[in-house]
Image (cartoon, rainbow, N blue to C red):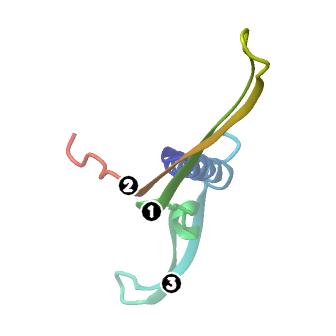
Amino acid sequence: MIPAPLVATIQAQSQMSHMLAQYVQDVGIDSDGNVRMVTMKYSESTVDTQGNPGTQDRYIQAPFLALTGIPNLAIEDVNIAFDLEVTTAEEDVTKNNADSTVNTEYKSIWSPVTAKFSGTVSHSSEQTRRTDTRAKYSFNVNARSRQLLKDL
């Protein structure tokens, strides 16, 4: 999650560099592998050694790419900032149910008395345990292009 924007930036820079190389190849280099040149002609007023005025044709050659400009884009600074909140909740419920029945009978051997007893005991309990965990993370990533080596 954190490096994905940086990786995308690097891939974009790589694609731009490839496109620049393709542009130079397509526009600035001819089919023989030579730099495409533009020849410009202009006339200049001159005076010969006898003082006679005249004109002389002059020529200037320049690389075509120097006249058209190169689409050179570079990503120099990248700021990636985002906040992430993680929330987990857990609930644990424990239920206990217990029923107990007791039946008993009493008979006397010496007398005609009898007794019957019966009883029921019931117990129910419930425990609930809740846990909430929250965490906030803030990420701030800065990337800058490195300067090229000037003195090799």
Name which residue type carries label 2: Ala
SS of the residue under disc 2: strand
For disc 2, the marked residue is 143
- Mark 1 or mark 3, earlier in chain: 3
Q: Which mark is residue 13?
A: none
Label 3 or label 2, whichever comes before in sequence order: 3
Between circles 2 and 1, the one closer to the viewer is: 1
Q: Nearer the viewer, mark 3 or mark 2?
A: 2
Q: Nearer the viewer, residue 36 or 116?
A: 116
- Image position, residue 63 (x, y; %): 53, 59
**In the shown orientation, is residue 148 left or right of residue 39?**
left
Q: Earlier in the sequence, mark 2 or mark 1?
A: 1
Q: Residue at the location (58% across, 52% down)?
A: 12
Q: Position of residue 110 (x, y in %)?
A: 71, 11
Residue 17 point in image, percent of width and height: 55, 49
- Residue for point 66% across, 56% down: 27
Looking at the image, which residue sits at the far top?
109
Taking the spot 52% from the left edge, 69% from the top edge, the residue there is: 59
Residue 120: percent from left, percent from top: 73, 33
- In the rendering, which numbered label is found on residue 55? 3
Look at mark 1 in the image and give the residue it sits on.
Answer: 81
Type of residue at label 1?
Answer: Ala
- For the residues labelled 3 and 2, the Cα–Cα distance comes to 59 Å
